[in-house]
Image (cartoon, rainbow, N blue to C red):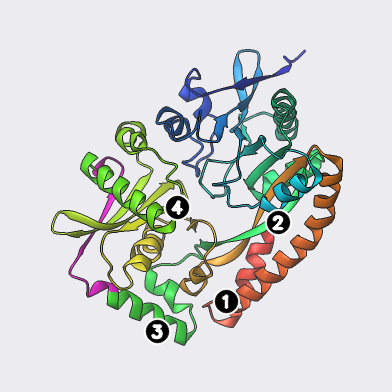
Amino acid sequence: MSESLDIRVLPSLRSLDPRAWNDLVGEDDPFVEHAFLSLLEESGSVGRGSGWEPSHVTVWRGQRLVGALPLYLKTHSYGEYIFDWGWADAASRLGVGYYPKLVSMVPVTPVTGRRFLLAQGEEPQSLVSRLIDGCFEVADATKSSSIHLLFLSPEEQQWVAHDDRLMSRLSFQFHWRNADYESFDHFVGEFRSSMRKKLRKERRVASESPLRIDKLQGEEISRSDWRALEGLYRATCGRKGSYPYLTPEFFELAPARLDGSPLVFAARDGERIVAASLNFAKGGHLYGRYWGATERHDMLHFELCYYRLIEHAIDQGMRRFEAGAQGTHKLRRGLMPVPIHSGHWLRHPVLAQAVADFLPREAASVQEQIRELSHHGPFRREQSVESEGQRESG
């Protein structure tokens, strides 16, 4: 007789063997590694007072960790990027509380990737169902109004749909996919002529800047570089009026805690960093995360946040580059709209029924937006049609 699948809820990752957790993590996702999630906790970027309280669900077969789902008790809806403010407002009108709620995603990191971390050799659907069981146990223990599993992979969305306890929601982001490009010029060669000229002009303007652009990865990023990145991060948050979730301790501890996944493109005036993008890479995936600048230089943002990263992805044979949430300006630079999946459960029956009625209409609108945006992408028309087929198939 096989051992039962037992659920344990962890208030932090501190007590868990990093190797046991990382054995569940796939080859392409740097953000659900023990190092990154525990760095958020250790630095105080999540935890008490942040609105992101760790309540990670784990599944054990005897003494062996076989499944995990990063989960957070939320007291607000900031930093999620799949927006439910309207749902919270509807709950208020009904006279019911919307917070706390439960969210599974990497905090303040709107990227797709694994939420269900599963041991090899285990049957996925049974583990997924047990992890969802764990979510409901936490929801009951904390009197949470709802459960939200955000930025699921297409495969995970199928598992969640098969479990049938959470409602499916559709949104979209702009991602770059590698169509076996041999070089950046090969990639740009697939653009329509007018769009190709605009892109090359942007790169030419950026190249005329007197700044030196360095690529730094992993241990090449010095402690002084990390301090400069923190300053840029806080300046950007201040300029945009957004809350700086990452604490100073995050940047202080990052050099010792993170491995080779951080990737920085830094523009320097002499030895001083005046602009930079902080990105993360693992396996076949590349993720753009933070940008900041102390000086304005025409087209430098596009160079450091898109073009250098696409170049890097092509050179390294990477399959996908995600540049974060929102931003239709990404479309003309070769990042195309792709569907983003999430799963949701709401406790209050009236609110749950209202959301259930709304989601199919929203999904139809999202699908139409994706089709319309794809039509206006920079690629030659026959290339756009081919890309649309690839997105629908995978």
Region rendered in magenta? 206-221
* Cβ atoms at labels 4 and 2 below 8 Å apart: no
Q: Amino acid at mark 3?
A: Lys
What SS does tag 3 mark? Answer: helix
Considering only order in the chain, which callout, 3 or 4, is on the residue closer to the N terminus? 3
| Quadrant location of the N terminus in the rendered image | top right
The tally of labels here is: 4
Which residue is depicted at the point 61% across and 62% down?
338
> x%, y% of residue 61?
66, 17
Q: Nearer the viewer, mark 1 or mark 4?
A: 4
Q: Which mark is residue 170?
A: 2
Which residue is depicted at the point 70% across and 34% down?
124
Inter-mark Cα distance, 1 to 4: 23 Å
Q: Mark 3, residues whose alpha carbon is within 10 Å: few (<14), some, or many (≥20)?
A: few
Q: Mark 2, residues whose alpha carbon is within 10 Å: few (<14), some, or many (≥20)?
A: some
> x%, y% of residue 245?
45, 42
Q: Which residue is mark 1?
A: 383
Q: Which residue is mark 3?
A: 197
**Quarter holding residue 222:** top left
Inter-mark Cα distance, 4 to 2: 23 Å
Inter-mark Cα distance, 1 to 2: 25 Å
**For residue 225: magenta?**
no
> x%, y% of residue 70?
58, 33
Q: Which mark is residue 87?
A: none
Q: Nearer the viewer, mark 3 or mark 1?
A: 3
Q: Which residue is mark 4?
A: 286
Q: Amino acid at mark 2?
A: Leu
Q: Nearer the viewer, mark 1 or mark 2?
A: 2
**Quarter holding residue 147:** top right
State left or right for residue 329 relative to residue 382. Answer: left
In this orientation, which residue lies closer to the viewer: 295 or 391?
Answer: 295
